[in-house]
Image (cartoon, rainbow, N blue to C red):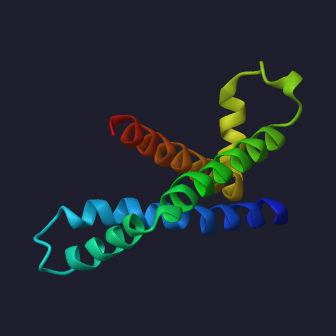
Amino acid sequence: MNSKRSIATGQLLLIFPAILFMGSLVVRQLSRLEQEPAYTAHRIVMWYAGKTWTLWVLLITLPLVVLVTGWLTLLRGWGDVSRLPHPMRKRLNGLSADRAMLFVAVLTLTAGFVLAIVAVHMAAN
């Protein structure tokens, strides 16, 4: 149980820069750039865009690490692969009973969404 919490905490720390960037993109569009919080959000976006390594490390590598570790944690938490054909309802009930595993699942899905958004943006350019 303690290892699941440490994995969830590590995932949260790794995904935070990408969530900050994506959130700043949204907040920046809510009002004019001269007003807060759009001004601060714009500065965060420009900081990310101004450095090449931030895009690769903070928006691709770290969410990919979260996605892989989350997937492996969820598979390990679900038990033996030979037992996977059982109804998924039982698996999801067990997942919701353990808050750390639920948090890992949410962060894994979030990392997948971040990577999908980055991949679509990279493909469009």
Give how far across and how far down residue 104 sits, in percent.
66, 53
Instruction: Residue at 58% x, 60% y: name it.
Output: 57
Indicate whether 106 appears above or below 33. above
Position of 63 with respect to 8 (left or right) is: left
Q: Quadrant of residue 95?
A: top right
Left or right of 16, for residue 84: right
Instruction: Tell me which residue sits at (38%, 59%) in the image.
Output: 22
Residue for point 61% across, 54% down: 61
In the image, residue 53 sits, relative to residue 117, either above or below, namely below
* Direction from residue 78 to residue 39 in the image, left or right: left
**In this view of the protein, which residue sits in the foreground, 120 or 10?**
120
Residue 64 image offset from top left, x and y in percent: 63, 48
| Position of the C terminus by quadrant | top left
Left or right of 28: which side holds 51?
Answer: right
How far across and down, in percent of the image, does residue 85 sit?
A: 77, 18
> Furthest-top residue in view?
85
Quarter of the image for residue 29 reads: bottom left
